[in-house]
Image: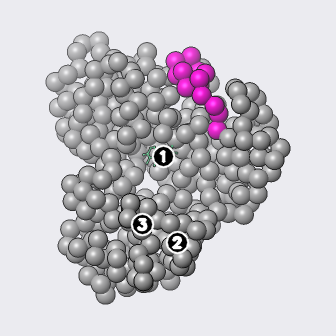
Amino acid sequence: MSNAQSADGQLRMESPLGPRMRIGGREVDYFCGTSYYCLHSHPDVIEAACVATRQFGMGPGTLAQMQVYNDLQDQLRTWFNAEHVVTLISGYSSPMALLQGLRDAFDIVFVDAATHYSARDALRTLVKPIHSFRHLDPGCLADALARNVAPEQRPVIVTDGVFPSSGALAPLHEYRRAMDRFEGALLVIDDSHGVGTLGPSGRGSLQHAGLESDGNFFAGTLSKAFGASGGIIPGSGELAEKIAANAMIMRGASPLTPGAAAAAAAAMHILQSNPEMKDNLARNVKQLRSGLRSLGFDVPETPVPIISVWGGPDLEHLRLKLDARDIIVRVVKPSGYSDAPDVPTMRLAVFSEHTPEQIDRLLSSIAELI
Ligand SMILES: Cc1ncc(COP(=O)(O)O)c(C=O)c1O
């Protein structure tokens, strides 16, 4: 039987994504990617995208107002309890727009060495001194701050909230403590995987950590939990004005498509009207994390739906054996992604829509195969 991955490592998807879907000519259980509520394939989300595309086309062809953007703005403001939520064409560009918007408020940058490419690319546009600190290491951050911040300089600390490959949570409290003695220090996080999944009402890593306060900022995406595509930056009206003034992407790039805007608004509406989806995600994350622990993997107890394991068995061999049982998982090559370690890792993504039986089957298959 053929393996679901083609030679270039890509999956050949033949249906909308889902917990059970068609890949490479077979119906399989799918534990990859980032659509944590499977909203990219929800009929109401697809329908909303089609209706908006028929009404407004693929885009305005310039910068223009369309009702579909106002509707998304209303949804986003409510979801994030924010005065304004800046939207832009992609999640990848949202840390750039946020950092450029804030650029007059900091002088020197400290970045977790494994921060996503999006923020690391963005830093090059700022023309400010940049220092890296060891991945997830507040002690290293504290040393770097002590060694490099001159009197009167205001630092910004840049990190992912949730790391996309490992699923690790940034130690935001410890970073804040390390920053305490630097007045005006800012924390800027790329929370692409935190928005929609973390925090009591899904506002992300800052809400989860109880750190929604002045000086802490985040950028996110609509392309993961929110079932669509496009970048978002929730915040104050003042922040939105700074972004409009400083970030040229706001003047020189097309907005997200009307279809994506309508899809994201519909996805948020579904999540708000079906709170059990968040409960199911939490249940599934717990089941998979504790099951992997009982198989001997070192897996922390967190609510993050990305779970990475390494060490022990030959993971590529395990992936192929799981594939032969119609269970699709991803093995990330050493250093094969922004935060991937220098050994192979098996990255599992768990969705609200997986059944407990599917997770049991994954766990019992791994138990039999290792
Ligand atoms: C941490 C992080 N930031 C940004 C992005 C880019 O987001 P988008 O695909 O919505 O452009 C990704 C994408 O996978 C990501 O993992």
Taking depth in this image into account, of 1 and 201 the one nearest to the observer is 1
Please tell me whether mark 1 sits on a helix, a strand or a loop.
loop
The stretch drawn in magenta includes residue 165: no
Q: Which mark is residue 192?
A: 1
State how the image is colored.
one colour
Residue at x-position 25% and y-position 44%:
135
Please tell me whether mark 3 sits on a helix, a strand or a loop.
loop
Amino acid carrying mark 2 in the image: Ile
Can residue 216 be seen in this snapshot? Answer: no
Q: Earlier in the sequence, mark 3 or mark 2?
A: 3
For residue 97, above or below residue 140: above
Q: Which residue is mark 3?
A: 6
| Residue span colored magenta | 243-256
Q: Position of residue 325 (x, y in %)?
A: 42, 84
Disc 3 versus disc 2: nearer the observer = 3
* The furthest residue to the top: 152
Q: Classify mark 3 as within 8 Å of ligand 1 or not, answering yes or no.
A: no
Q: Which residue is mark 2?
A: 23
For residue 320, above or below residue 171: below
Q: Position of residue 282 (x, y in %)?
A: 50, 65
Q: How many marks?
A: 3
